[in-house]
Amino acid sequence: MPGLPDLALRVRQAIASESATLDSLARLIAADAVLTTRIMKVVNAAALRRATPVSRLDRAIGALGFNLTNSLVTGLCLLRQTERYSGAVGERLRAHHEHAIEVAAIAHYLAQSTPGLDEQEALLAGLIHDIGALPVFAFAARQSELARDAAALDGLVARHHPSFGARILVEWHFPERFVAVAAEHEHADRRHEGPTDLLDVVIAANLQSRQRVQCMEVDAPALERFNLIADPLAGRDGARAAIEALHRTLVA
Ligand SMILES: [Fe+2]
Ligand SMILES: [Fe+2]
């Protein structure tokens, strides 16, 4: 299992100690300029419909709340760890990162028009849904034969990433609904009573991601919940543009 990045650990400890204030958290996070920029971008992207954009980190943290700030810092720090690998594994990781960002942008878009869903949570859930692939890639980076065998590596990732992801998120005290996203997002045939939830939005976004188009043929109740079978994203006015705008924001 990968360790929690240092800054994410300190943010987590500060929040757990209950002595954290908007100010003290903002000071802690501001020490990392790249992370600060990404958080501001996520908050403002999620707040596109607000009259005034948030321009200060403490206000951004206030808008997110401590728990989401905590999860977002962890998610962003973790995705950044993918940048340190090179070669075949590095390439795979970057494709994986790109897919996570696309799923985040689609999930955000879908959540906006669904009562009861929080678009920032949806974005974060999209970012971390495949997090369990990271330990598999980290393992492959140390095994040159596996690193060169794309089919074997894909097989390992496919088999293990849901359970690894759930274990990572439990260890890092993510809320239960995020753990469920990591554990169950590959269950395209998930069917349940009750309102559309975070797991539905990630299942639908994952299936809609360009790198997963082959999955569009499966029986997927989550796609029906967002009316994506009768009215695919590709044909919706403005959907592609909104998703691509957020996507560009997240990779910048
Ligand atoms: Fe996955
Ligand atoms: Fe995925």
Image (cartoon, grey):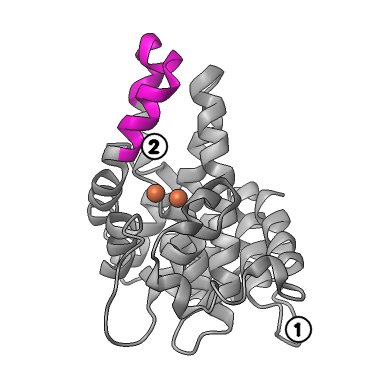
Decide if ligand 1 comes within 8 Å of the CB at mark 2: no
Residue at 59 percent across and 51 percent down: it is 35
The residue nearer to you, when weighing 46 against 64, is: 46
The secondary structure type at the circle numbered 2 is helix
Does 155 lie within the magenta span? yes
Q: What percent of the width, then of the height, locates residue 250?
A: 65, 55
Indicate left or right for 60 with 238 as reference. Answer: left
Residue 16 quadrant = bottom left
Say which quadrant the N terminus sits in. Answer: top left
Q: Which residues are magenta?
A: 139-158
The kind of residue on which mark 1 rests is Thr
The residue nearer to you, when weighing 248 against 14, is: 248
Indicate left or right for 182 with 56 as reference. Answer: left
Q: Is residue 192 above or below residue 76?
A: below
Circles 2 and 1: CB atoms closer than 8 Å: no
Q: Label 2 neighbourhood size at 10 Å, few (<14), some (14-19), many (20+)?
A: many
Residue at 49 percent across and 90 percent down: it is 115
Q: Is residue 82 above or below residue 63?
A: above
Q: What percent of the width, then of the height, locates residue 142?
A: 36, 15
The kind of residue on which mark 2 rests is Leu
Indicate left or right for 217 with 34 as reference. Answer: left
Whether residue 20 is visible, yes or no, is: no
Q: What percent of the width, then of the height, locates residue 244?
A: 72, 60
Please give the label number shown on residue 134: 2
Please give the label number shown on residue 52: 1
Residue at 63 percent across and 56 percent down: it is 38
Indicate left or right for 22 with 9 as reference. Answer: right
Q: Label 1 neighbourhood size at 10 Å, few (<14), some (14-19), many (20+)?
A: few
The residue nearer to you, when weighing 67 against 23, is: 67
Which badge, 2 or 1, is on the more N-terminal residue? 1
